[in-house]
Amino acid sequence: MEPVSTTTIQPSQEDRMEIFTIGFTKLSASQFFNVLDEAGITKVVDIRLHNTSQLAGFTKRDDLAFFLDRVSGISYAHEPLLAPTAELLEGFKIGSLSWSEFETAFRSVLRERNVEGALDRSRFEGRVALLCSEPTGAHCHRTIVADYLASAWRCPPVTHL
């Protein structure tokens, strides 16, 4: 009779990381935290260029970190390396850049920044939601970032909350 192995196979890093995206505009605080809780999010990574605006309400950087921890036990990090440049963001907002032009330019910025190598991948383990303000990911840089990281780090497909 062959001995039974008691070795536990540890999941690969790819198996421990799931990327989600969420925007907070048009959501009440209750809706926002419920969506995160229902998805089992363990960490929110804020990828906004400006995250302290008075217009952000409950999602201003320090308030959001406090509420995430107290309401849902979710950790918070701000990662400006994943935000677009001010020039790109402004160009898209005022219409001098189409979505397609913005997307192409921002992907180039992510490559130039070498975000997949520059970021500590272990900070993204678990069920991580990339946060921005747009209500949907359709024309938001968080979709570009999520797809870029999922491809570079060989993660499961991205889920947009």
Image (spheres, helix red, strand yellow):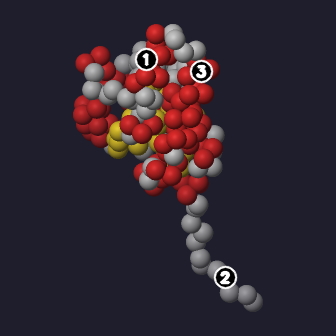
Name the outermost residue toward the bottom. Answer: 1
Mark 3, secondary structure of its residue:
helix
For the residues marked 2 and 3, what is the alpha-carbon distance in whole angstroms?
58 Å
Q: Nearer the viewer, residue 144 or 19?
A: 144
For the residues marked 3 and 1, what is the alpha-carbon distance in whole angstroms?
13 Å
Mark 1, secondary structure of its residue:
helix
Give the class, few, some or many, for how many residues have Cα within 10 Å of label 1's Cα (few <14, many ≥20): few
Q: Nearer the viewer, mark 2 or mark 3?
A: 3
Circles 3 and 1, Cβ within 8 Å, touching? The answer is no
Q: Nearer the viewer, residue 82 or 25?
A: 82
Q: Position of residue 39 (x, y in %)?
A: 50, 36
Circles 2 and 3, Cβ within 8 Å, touching? The answer is no
Q: Position of residue 31 (x, y in %)?
A: 41, 23
Q: Quadrant of the N terminus?
A: bottom right
How many numbered badges does the structure rendering display? Answer: 3
Question: Does residue 15 sit above or below 60 in this rendering?
Answer: below
Q: Earlier in the sequence, mark 2 or mark 1?
A: 2
- What residue is at 59 percent from the left and 36 percent from the top? 147
Q: Disc 2 designates what residue?
A: 4
Q: Disc 3 designates what residue?
A: 101
Q: Disc 1 designates what residue?
A: 90
